[in-house]
Image: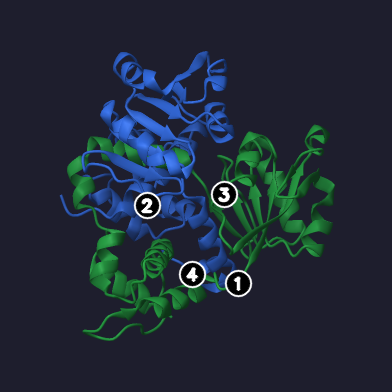
Chain colours: A blue, B green
Amino acid sequence: MAKVPSAAISRLVTYLRILEDLEARGVNRTSSEQLSEEAQVTAFQVRKDLSYFGSYGTRGVGYTVPVLRRELQQILGLNRRWGLCIVGMGRLGQALADYPGFDEHFDLRGFFDIDPAKHGLSFRGVAVEALEHLPRAVAERRIEVGLIAVPADSAQSVADRMIDSGLRGILNFAPVVLEVPKEVAVENVDFLAGLSRLSFFILNPRLREEMIG
Amino acid sequence: MAKVPSAAISRLVTYLRILEDLEARGVNRTSSEQLSEEAQVTAFQVRKDLSYFGSYGTRGVGYTVPVLRRELQQILGLNRRWGLCIVGMGRLGQALADYPGFDEHFDLRGFFDIDPAKHGLSFRGVAVEALEHLPRAVAERRIEVGLIAVPADSAQSVADRMIDSGLRGILNFAPVVLEVPKEVAVENVDFLAGLSRLSFFILNPRLREEMIG
């Protein structure tokens, strides 16, 4: 397979959402032009992103919405259910635990905090536990991905414990670059980077409008 | 100026952080190779990203860290201070208001909620106010960017009020695509997309290691 730019994966997520939306509206056929318009990229980009993973659609006919939706789900690994946990049940962790937008592919199965005062709380019918319970919970409840919602200065030690417990992916909300073995995937939710991008785009509105990708 | 890929702006933010870190450690010179290694992109990518905005560095000599840092700050508009407000002071809004990672370029100047029960709270010495106060606060306190931390079903109406009040940029935490006039910049903090990317990368570890960009 050709080297895939990391940004292509983000775009596949966007295409999938557009397809889900089209499907929910009963639309059966689409085109790289329609996808590109809604995703605000070029039609060439859409075709190129899909081409990394196979041959989709028919020239001059386009794509069948439910078929391409299923294929994208499979490429992204969203044809299965992922078990998640949150470590750090302060306000951010609690906001995440109550977040209504998790879809059927992401299942919150554990909440952990070092503060015993948090252990009385429960979310989605699951009680907040001591961090010491993490390894057992990971094994027993098939938890695969951990969300880090602790302060920056404890994020690395939480990441280490997650990895020791067998987690394979980390979604990090702490403003720190985590060091992890190469077999562990990390995504950072970095809203300061979003603010820096806004700063640029506010000052360069014309560039933003012309922007590709 | 050549068309700039949107992802290049994200990478400039990454380069800036690396330079700030080098400068804090007293390092005075760097190279596209060093930047590329720390940013996990190719050296060609670093030089190309910088080339959109001018001519930086000297062949065979590299970059002077504080000079390139200042130039990147200027490109990104981070040589000034941006006034921010948060609308929606539930757990997420409160977590954001107390977030310690805002640097000197971002200044929280207003907190708003429709719920009167929230109006007694205060963060960073600023009281939470009724949403009706937004237009006046924007004008009087030079607020330019709004953070949306309300539920999905009220995010668009909050965005509309922000735009009517004169905000030029929106950082949206709600899981919804906002419709805004083209002169307003929007960035979405989308952690479900982060989870979808994790799903892909956990299932494709080899692709992740080889990944470019």
Callout 3, which amino acid?
Pro
Q: CA distance from mark 4 to mark 1?
A: 25 Å
Q: Are marks 3 and 4 in contact (CB under 8 Å)?
A: no
Q: Is residue A172 visible?
A: no
The residue indicated by pointer 1 is B80
* Chain label for disc 3: B
- Tell which subunit mark 1 falls on: B
Residue type at mark 4 is: Glu
Labels 3 and 4 share a subunit: no
Q: Residue at 23% of width from left, 50% of height from top?
A: A52
Determine which quarter of the picture holds residue A13: top left
In which quadrant of the rendered view does residue A82 lie? top left
Residue B197 vs residue B141: left or right?
left
Query: Please, what secondary structure does the residue beneath circle 1 have?
Result: loop
Same chain letter for marks 3 and 1 = yes
Instruction: Report crowding for label 1: few under 14, some 14 to 19, many 20 or more residues within 10 A (C-alpha).
Output: few
Chain on which label 2 sits: A
**Circle 4 or circle 1, nearest the eye:** 1
Question: Label 2 neighbourhood size at 10 Å, few (<14), some (14-19), many (20+)?
Answer: many
Chain for disc number 4: A
**Is tag 3's residue or tag 1's residue first in the polypeptide sequence?**
1
Q: Are marks 2 and 4 in contact (CB under 8 Å)?
A: no
Tell me, for residue A210, which label it has, or none: 4
Which residue is tagged 3? B100
Per the rendering, the mark at residue A32 is 2
